[in-house]
Image (cartoon, helix red, strand yellow):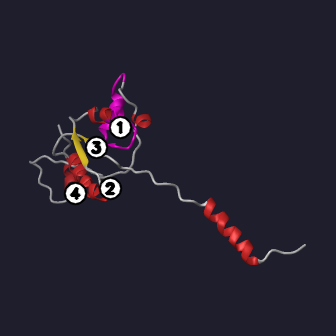
Amino acid sequence: MKRLPNWIFTCAIAVWNTTLFVPAEAQDYPNKAIRIVTSGIGGTPDFMSRLLAGGMSPTLGQPIVIDNRSSGLIPGQVVVAAPPDGYTLLVYGGTTWVGPLFQKAPSYDPLRDLAPISMITFSSHGARSPSVIAGQIRQATDCTSESPPR
């Protein structure tokens, strides 16, 4: 039995590899404007949406429209009712996830109807009475533990 030359074997492998690993044709997303639904004007979700839109629009080559809705469950309901094509996004807080738990017949199930993409921001808030003078956190906690609110 005669052995094939190495160059024929090498060419056969190269042809096989090029047909096996043909790159998939890219989808043309986005090919229209993207809508970001968020809560009322001026809040953190609105600010973050506008910040994201300013960075994403030039990169994607499409306009990004900020759609402000009233607070509560309405922004989530708008996104759930939109076609699931990736052109309607939601930037909103905990009400989207927790709000339906407090309804007898929620209009959407956030775990089933929404898919988280990314955490954009994390905020933690603290407050104190204007009558309390505390320069450090330790002093503030000592004040509250000594005289709880009435």
Write the residue at 62% across / 60% down. 19
The kind of residue on which mark 3 rests is Arg
Question: In which image quadrant can residue 67 be found?
Answer: top left
SS for callout 3: strand
Q: Which residue is mark 1?
A: 97
Real-space CA distance between mark 1 and mark 4, rounded to the nearest whole angstrom: 31 Å
- Nearer to us: label 1 or label 4: 1
The kind of residue on which mark 4 rests is Ile
Q: Residues within 10 Å of mark 4 (few under 14, many from 20)?
A: few
Real-space CA distance between mark 3 and mark 1, rounded to the nearest whole angstrom: 20 Å
> Considering depth in this image, is 42 or 51 the residue closer to the camera?
51
Say whether residue 23 is magenta.
no
Mark number displayed over residue 137: 4
Q: Are marks 4 and 3 in contact (CB under 8 Å)?
A: no
Q: Which residue is mark 2?
A: 60
Say whether residue 82 is magenta.
yes
Real-space CA distance between mark 4 and mark 3, rounded to the nearest whole angstrom: 41 Å
Q: Earlier in the sequence, mark 4 or mark 3?
A: 3
Region of the chain picked out in magenta, as a range: 79-105
Q: Position of residue 48 (x, y in %)?
A: 24, 51
- Nearer to us: label 2 or label 1: 2
SS for callout 2: helix
Write the residue at 19% across / 56% down. 139
